[in-house]
């Protein structure tokens, strides 16, 4: 039986509104929308496996973002620098 995450997410009204805006933005990158939705569902009391099923993603991904938000707040949802050689091509749309 799945257990409840030790990282309980509690949002104040301002945090919830900001995440709801981010999750509803059609022009936001997909990853921003999904991370916001993960946190909103976690704050609603859903377990990681329930959120994963609802958003059709691996439970480990949900667990990662829930933990990072718990530890770092909104800043934890941002991408971190990656190792390795820099990209040779600009992101899509750039020239």
Image: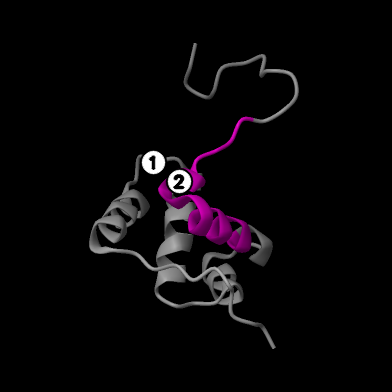
Label number found at residue 32: 2
Foreground label between 2 and 1: 2
- Residue sitting at x 49%, y 11%: 95
Stretch of the chain drawn in magenta: 62-81
The quadrant in which residue 62 appears is: bottom right
67 vs 26: above or below: below
| Magenta: main secondary structure | helix
State which quadrant residue 82 falls in: top right
Question: Where in the figure is residue 61, as x and y percent of width and height?
Answer: 63, 58
> Among all residues in the image, which is located at the extreme front?
71
- Badge 1 is on which residue? 28
How is this picture coloured? one colour
Residue shown at the point (48%, 53%) measured from the top left: 35
When the figure is inspected, residue 52 is found, relative to residue 86, above or below; the finding is below
Q: Is residue 66 magenta?
A: yes
Q: Residue 57: where, in percent of width, then height?
A: 61, 62
Which residue is found at the position 74% from the left and 19% from the top?
85
Q: Is residue 28 above or below residue 45?
A: above
Q: Are marks 2 and 1 in contact (CB under 8 Å)?
A: yes
Task: Bin the neighbour count of mark 2 within 10 Å (Cα to Cα): few under 14, some 14-19, many 20 and up.
Answer: some
Whole-percent x, y for residue 12 in the image:
28, 63
Q: Secondary structure at mark 2?
A: helix
Q: Where residue 6 sits in the image (x, y, percent)?
A: 58, 73
Query: Quick check: is 67 in the magenta stretch?
Result: yes
Secondary structure under the numbered disc 1 in the rendered image: loop
- Disc sitting over residue 53 in the figure: none
């Amino acid at each position: 039986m799945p257990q409840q995450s030790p990282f309980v997410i509690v949002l104040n009204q301002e945090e919830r509104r900001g995440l709801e805006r981010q999750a509803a933005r059609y022009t936001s990158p997909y990853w921003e929308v999904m991370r916001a939705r993960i946190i909103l569902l976690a704050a609603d009391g859903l377990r990681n496996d329930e959120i994963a099923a609802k958003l059709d993603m691996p439970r480990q991904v949900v667990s990662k973002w829930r933990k990072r938000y718990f530890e770092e707040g909104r800043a934890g949802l941002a991408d971190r620098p990656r190792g390795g050689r820099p990209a040779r091509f600009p992101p899509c749309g750039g020239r």
